[in-house]
Image (tube, rainbow, N blue to C red):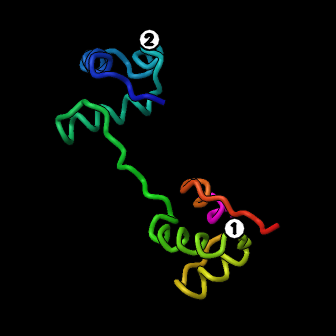
Amino acid sequence: MEPYDLEFRGEVLAACDTTEERRLIALRFNVSESWLRRIQQQRRETGQIAPKLAAPRQPKWHTWADWLIAKIASRPDIYLRELQADLKQERGEEVCLGTICAACRGLDLSRKKRR
């Protein structure tokens, strides 16, 4: 969901500065009362009304991505369970199979069986 733009936030805060009830303001602008409370708190504490930017998240597997690339390059037909066991043994990381699968997808790695 995209954050509300600065102009809309200014209009809402201008309405909050009047004596109108918070519930009525929320209904008029089609926002929640909790959002009104949070934006007022943000303005009071920081003086800013711009939306907060979320910090980019690093996936859990990001720290051992190079290890995974090397492991699959050396043995392309390795099973996920074998990767899981090697990861625990070699790096001390205990992760589920879904995380390893997500890492393979995120790195565009495919495990191919020998024929």
Dot 2 amino acid type: Arg
- Observer-side mark, 1 or 2, equals 1
The magenta segment: 97-102
Q: Position of residue 35 (x, y in %)?
A: 41, 31
Q: In the depicted view, which residue is nearer to us: 96 or 62?
A: 62
Mark 1 falls on what kind of element? helix
> Residue placed farthest to the front in the image?
115
Residue topped by disc 2: 28
Q: Residue at x 69, y 67 (%)?
A: 97
Q: On the rendered structure, is 3 left or right of 27?
A: left
Q: Position of residue 42 (x, y in %)?
A: 27, 38
Q: Which mark is residue 97?
A: 1
> Pointer 2: residues within 10 angstroms few (<14), some, or many (20+)?
few
Q: On the rendered structure, is 33 left or right of 18?
A: right
Q: Position of residue 21 (x, y in %)?
A: 38, 19
Q: Choose top left, top right, bottom left or bottom right for residue 58.
A: bottom left
